[in-house]
Image (cartoon, grey):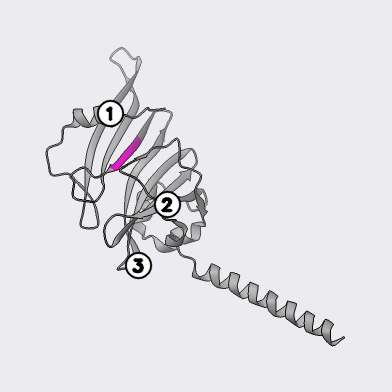
Amino acid sequence: MKYIIGGLFGLLFFGMGCESQESSSSDTATLISYFKPIEPGDTLFIGLEDGWDGDTIPPQFVWAELDSVLLTELSPDPDSAAMIFTANGSWMQDSTHQLCLMNVAQSWWKFRVLLVYDQDRKAFTRSESVALFYGGDGGQIATSSFLFDQDGDGDRDLVVRTRDRSLRMGEEGDVNEVIEESVYLRDWAVGGFKDSPMQVDTVGLVAQFRVEWE
């Protein structure tokens, strides 16, 4: 009998230990812990067709750790009940800043953002939209990005391609489809991406960084 009782106490102790460990793991989880390290390579293309199979992030971590400005940047109309978040990895952008690629789905809109995590402050400080599909029947906006070291300073910069489709009334009352494409360069500086101050060959960037729009 003493062996049976001892075994029962052992199982009870083991079960309590497992429960305590799981509870501790859940209690100590943070938003940054969902972003596993990856190697982005020399040039990373961030589009909308691939890369949506990351780890699902519980929404409470997003709402708790991103301030109101960053939350607004995730979506023009953030809805906590309808948004789905997934993590697609992270990498060091410089010695103290970590870039985290996060996907956001809301209704049929899609957004991919780079969250900037400041390791000194232990907080997410900035957000950069790198791919999106947003709009309705009257028009849509789509963007895709390329991340690479454009100026040779050792950190990665952004080339962002944008396609704007709209329907406009003609002079005779007919409806015309208008498609406009643009490109801009964002340099990494002082913990975030900034519009490039240098003169950029936009035609050359469009030719070099092509996007097959769906």
Towards the viewer: 179 or 41 = 41
Q: CA distance from mark 1 to mark 3?
A: 38 Å
> Could you classify mark 1 by the number of other residues whose Cα lies within 10 Å: few (under 14), some (14-19), or many (20 or more)?
few
Task: Report the magenta residues as a range.
Answer: 143-147
Q: Secondary structure at mark 1?
A: strand
Q: Which residue is mark 1?
A: 181
Q: Residue furthest bottom?
A: 2
Relative to residue 160, is residue 26 drawn left or right?
right
User: Relative to 1, does residue 83 appear above or below in the rendering?
Assistant: above
Left or right of 171, for residue 46: right
- Between the residue at mark 2 and the residue at mark 1, the CA separation in whole angstroms equals 29 Å
* Residue wearing tag 3: 122
Where does residue 44 sit, x and y in percent of width and height?
34, 42
* Residue drawn at point x = 50 percent, y = 56 percent: 59
Determine the secondary structure under disc 2.
strand
Instruction: Return the x and y of residue 197 as percentages of the image width and height.
Output: 13, 44
Q: Is residue 171 above or below residue 189?
A: above
Q: Residue at x 32, y 65 (%)?
A: 119
